[in-house]
Amino acid sequence: MRVCLILEGSYPYVYGGVSNWTHQFIQAMPEIEFVLWCIGAKAENKGKYKYTLPKNVTQVYEVFLDDALRLRNKRGKIPRLKKEEFIQLTNLLECKNVDWSILFDLFQNKKMNPTALLMSATFMKALVNLCKEKYPFVPFADLFHTFRSMILPELHILTSEVPKADIYHATATGYSGLLGSLAKWKYEKKFILTEHGIYTREREEELLRAKWVAPCFKQQWIDLFYNFSNCAYSHADVITALFERANNIQAELGADPKKLRAFANGVHYDRFCDIPIKEENGHIDIGAVVRIAKIKDIKTLIYAFAELKVECANARLHILGDVDDEVYYEECKRLVEQLHIEDVFFTGVVNVIDYMKDLDFTVLSSISEGQPLSVLESFAARRPCVTTDVGCCRELLEGNGEDNLGKAGICIPPMHKEELERAMYRLSIDETMRKQMGEIGQKRVKQYYMHEISMNRYRKLYYEEK
């Protein structure tokens, strides 16, 4: 069996939860041949992998969004659009009711050049109509450049060479969901969509806070990603999420409930279960296993830790993970300096299994999550967690209604430094609570979140859908 995994902004270019899941996923199925169809932001990262690819990865297709900016501006004759093609181009601009098969045919079979199209009178006509209808008081130059920057990468990836496979499996509803839909249309094969978080909601949260987007265009950018999810949900044969509440959100966003399944994450329990409890060293060592990015809200964690140091001078914070956002990383380091906080360590990428023996408990301050592997790994090692109430974190900490094991950590509201500090303080001063919660977490992982169980569900799905 040949499976094409469609990956966006993750494996194999960066470390992180989805990347680690992908690497373990491929390794768990050595009998399956995997082709990777990878979407990255910058072409300068071509071939620069953070992971050594498993032997059952036979090909890698790379698509970079900034390559769209290097497309040749062909001023030659442009194929005249049929009426229905013009209508779908207009719908694409307006992010509504797109008949994707017409656009797929236009860019795959008719070889429409995206840059040529965006320089055409046809595109200008559609844009002028949109300006009159929705943006009559916005300078047309601003409108033109905004919409061009939105739509060009989208059209560029529609021209991509589509790898041949028996099954296509995308890990998000964004550009990867668009490519999965394209592959299903082109080769009439099954398309599986897995969301580790709700991609559309995550992009919406980022865009609402973004300073680079003019306020008048924020909703348009948000609608773009909702349009992607509509495309992916409508084309996918099976849609999986990590927990039932995420399935419910997918249904609210337009996914057919008949397609939805919940497949929980799992961890290699045996790699963590024998890690000893930390030996007394006069410090309380707190670990945050995260990639350094805005969505992980590390700044709130730093503010909360600064307050914790006032009451708990022997506390130390270890931030373990790769740098996903260099600018944000520098901002976090400056914040530590400005607050004059001691004992904050940015370790970079480390072996979490080796490092875990030096930690008392872990913390996750994210604004958005799915079902974080870092929490499950912490539990498997008998380390309790403080997490924000996002994704299924509360379910991991307190149980899903099927068990009565008790609490394995403390759940607090996102972006609430006072509650975060209070929770870290409680675990810092109460060794008995840490041990009790750690034992509960380990039992919960052993009963419900084993790696083998999770992988077997996907393996069975592959053979059902082939």
Image: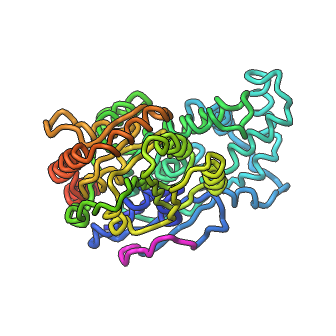
When the figure is inspected, residue 161 is found, relative to residue 236, above or below; the finding is below
- Residue 239 showing in the rendered view: no
**Magenta highlight on residue 51:** yes
Q: Which residues are magenta?
A: 48-57
The furthest residue to the bottom: 55
Observer-nearest residue: 275 or 307? Answer: 307
Number of numbered discs overlaid on the protein picture: 0
Quadrant containing the C terminus is bottom left
- Residue 423 showing in the rendered view: yes
| Residue positioned 62% across, 46% down in the render | 339
Horizontal and vertical percent for residue 224? Answer: 60, 37
Horizontal and vertical percent for residue 329? Answer: 61, 55
Observer-nearest residue: 150 or 97? Answer: 150
Quadrant containing the N terminus is bottom left
| Residue positioned 71% across, 42% down in the render | 81
Left or right, 170 with respect to 462, comes to right
Observer-nearest residue: 465 or 443? Answer: 443
When the figure is inspected, residue 185 is found, relative to residue 356, above or below; the finding is above
Q: Main secondary structure of the magenta part?
A: loop
**Magenta highlight on residue 176:** no
Q: Quadrant of residue 413?
A: top left
Horizontal and vertical percent for residue 386? Answer: 36, 42
